[in-house]
Amino acid sequence: QAFSDELLQKAIAEERPVIIDFNAEWCAACHELEEYTFSDPRVIEYGKSFLWLSFDATNPSEQMDILQKRYGIGGLPYVILYGTDGKPAMNQVLTGFEDADNFLKRMKAVYKP
């Protein structure tokens, strides 16, 4: 789903884990994440418990500027995970390509059903 603060706040209120994927058309590693990591059946299955949000940063925007300051985004890809405590797990931020095995470990670090 497309990122919105409203969806994020709803998930936090429901104590649901969240993944926010900041990506862009010009970002090669973003495409690799989509093709090899996010499409892995294990990531898809485990990810069903998460709210997956996507933010398209292809073109500059005021909203991206705000989020860049909020999360300290320096480049793309930038994938942030929230645990059920409603806080971003800044020690689990992904800032480059990562294979499915390691991304699954990252997901499990913030959420264990």
Image (spheres, grey):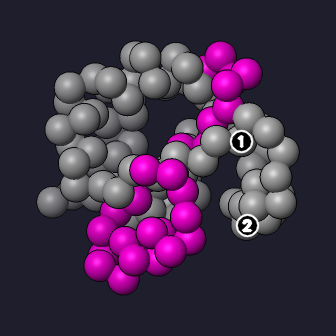
Q: Position of residue 72 (x, y in %)?
A: 76, 56
Q: Earlier in the sequence, mark 1 or mark 2?
A: 1
Q: Is residue 43 on the magenta stretch?
A: no
Closest to the camera, between mark 1 and mark 2, is 1
Camera-nearest residue between 54 and 78: 54
Query: For the point 46% across and 24% down, which residue is it?
Result: 34
Q: CA distance from mark 1 to mark 2?
A: 15 Å
113 vs 1, nearest the viewer: 1
Q: Indicate whether 12 appears above or below 35.
A: below
Left or right of 28? Residue 38 is left
The residue indicated by pointer 2 is 70
Local secondary structure at mark 2: helix
User: Mark 1: which amino acid?
Assistant: Ala
Task: Name the residue type under label 2.
Answer: Arg
Residue 67 - label? none
- Could you tell me residue 21's position as x and y percent? 54, 44
User: Is residue 99 at least partly visible in the picture?
Assistant: no
Based on the displayed image, in which of its 4 quarters is residue 42 positioned?
A: top left
Lateral position of residue 10 relative to residue 58, left or right: left
Q: Secondary structure at mark 1?
A: loop
| Residue located at (75% from left, 50% from top) | 73
Highlighted range, magenta: 1-29
